[in-house]
Image: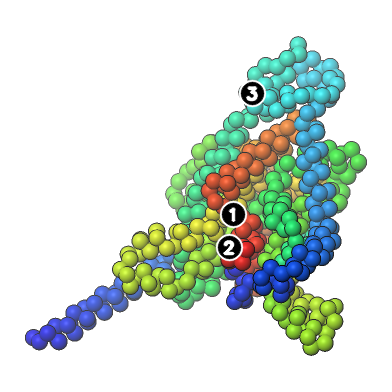
Amino acid sequence: MATELGPTPVKEPASGGTPIHHGPKGVGEDNAIASQGKWASWLLAPTIVALAIVIVYPIISAIVMSFQKDAGLDPVTGLFTEGGPAGFSNYTNWLFQQCAAPGGGTVACPPGTLGSQFWSATGTTFYFTIVTVTLETILGFWMAIIMARTFRGRSLVRAAVLVPWAIPTAVTAQLWLFIFAFEGIGNKLFNTTILWTGSEIPARWAVIIADTWKTTPFMALLILAGLQMIPAEVYEAAKVDGASAWQRFRMITLPLVKPALMVAILFRTLDALRMFDLPYILTEGSNNTTTLSILVVNQIRQGFNSAAALSTITFIIIFMVAFIFVRFLGANVVEQQTGAGKGKK
Amino acid sequence: MTAATELRAEQDRGRKAAQNREKWASVRTYVSAAVILFWCLAPAYWMVVTAFRDVGYTYDTSLLPTHITLDNFRTAFDTSFGNRFGQALLNSVFIGVTVTVISLVLGVFAAYALARLNFRFKYFVLGFILGASMFPGVALITPLFQLFTNIGWIGTYQALIIPNISFVLPLTVYTMTSFFREMPWELEEAARVDGCTQGQAFRRVIMPLAAPAIFTTAILAFISSWNEFLIASQLSNDATQPVTVAIANFAGAQPQQIPYTAIMAAGTIVTIPLVILVLVFQRKIVAGLTAGAVK
């Protein structure tokens, strides 16, 4: 119910300015909808056309490209190879980590080449996604619960959480790179001598910590919006009935905040799956911090069509995750957005 | 002891226990609030402290500001090591303003339709726009890179503005849609009953009410364009790069040594205006964020 958290809550959702909307379905309604539909299509046309140009056209063109061979010099034979239809070979090469062999055909990509990194990049991407979203959900929930309480200085806390959110990710990456420098404040404060960007586990955790810092506020604010939708009387009633704090949390807070929570988790998950800025700047993709997005960007200059296939695979992965969320985990985004849950269907 | 006094003593004990519990709960709240404040502000504080610290004391770890100087801000704008931070600032402002204006002009109509009109496929359109905003930028970069290479647009402003519209416009539409939905549209009807034409009612009644919503949306749109890095890192050149790219590639006198103090100064410059803007319009921004639900 995130949408209902307006600065000036209105008692009733705006009716769309159609008086007939409230009445029983009359004869005029179909006509009214038809005429509004005409208006709506004129008003929506510029946005739809713009999005078609900047999103739909590139997707289609990426898919077309992904079925073409990359033209260019063969790295092994030094001969110029023509482009031409590739069938699914760009896709299968990524999935099975195959590279072109000198005599035609394919061999397993040698370690270190981009072609050999598909599954490790996929693994890294999911590792980052699962760990950061889990951390952010727990921390965000905790922050939201604190911010929902009344205490002096609450507005200060609510303002402070916006600070990490307002700092550009590129700056965040440089800031944490400095904090995690060998002689930096991070090692000093915790009295450690970790070479943060030097090996796999610290490098990954440097990215995870920076990402958690940057995006937990967003999560906390979304959950807070959900918490504020719960009427205080519900808690009072439960208290009177003798429910413990834990019971109140489990039986009231969790189920009632779940719609907002699921949307927050969905948004964060989709965002984490395309993570690029932080590992690209913070660790430059070294030590197993190369995400799928970084792999695509590295591939672009080595062959558009192969990169197009990889970006299409990435897109399909993200789309599937979104589908699973909406279909099976009940993250109903559109309903949240339209406020149809308010009983005005 | 009579039953009455016993009962009173019992009640007293109960009240005291409840008071104690409350006291502890409030202590816990304040401690938690302090932890949140520290977690959110300490790294940002460190950026600002470092920005004002003499470069010779880059790794000084005293927590209070020491060796205060403005040199780092001069270094940030210095172009002798190939950095073009000043130019990048102008580029980011130019790109951000252009993207925001285009998105607002297009988006305001769409948001009005989605918030106020009933039509078929409304859910489909909303779903499409939401999906568009969640669209991975990396899926756009390859075809755009090839297209812009072919038509010679790599490094031009339009090559940076057009991809940004792909995620700023959807964000604009649904943030404004949820703001518009909560506006008191009855006032428009009332104005018309009082003799305004539809145009007058819109200009005199609705526009002033919608202005804060549009302004908040503009801030959110500008911030998301200002923060964009992936596409800009591939499609810009030295002359057109935005600040995010300039900061990521910031070079020092020695290639081995990262000029952290200058980078933190640059980071402070690009962050402080945003932070002030966000804090001033905090309530509206939070409403817009949670309505739109975007990073």
Q: How far apart are marks 2 and 1 (CA)?
A: 10 Å
Q: Mark 3 lies on which chain?
A: A
Marks 2, 3 in one chain: yes
Q: Are marks 3 and 1 in contact (CB under 8 Å)?
A: no
Q: Mark 3 points at which residue?
A: A96
Q: What element carries label 3?
A: loop
Q: Name the residue under label 1.
A: A332
Q: In which quarter of the image is the N terminus of chain A?
A: bottom right
Q: How far apart are marks 3 and 1 (CA)?
A: 35 Å
Q: Name the residue under label 2.
A: A341
Give left or right: position of B165 versus A95: right
Q: Which chain carries label 2?
A: A
The residue lying at 76 percent from left, 17 percent from top is: A76
Q: Mark 3 or mark 1, which is nearer to you?
A: 1
Residue kind at label 1, given as amino acid type: Asn
Where residue B86 appears, x then y in whole percent? 79, 58
Q: What element carries label 1?
A: loop
Relative height, residue A202 to residue B84 (above, below): above
The residue lying at 80 percent from left, 54 percent from top is: A48
Circle 3 Cα neighbour tier, 10 Å, few/some/many (<14 / 14–19 / ≥20): some
State which quadrant residue A311 falls in: top right
Where residue B192 appears, x then y in whole percent? 80, 83
The residue lying at 85 percent from left, 21 percent from top is: A82
State which quadrant residue B220 falls in: bottom right
Residue kind at label 3, given as amino acid type: Phe
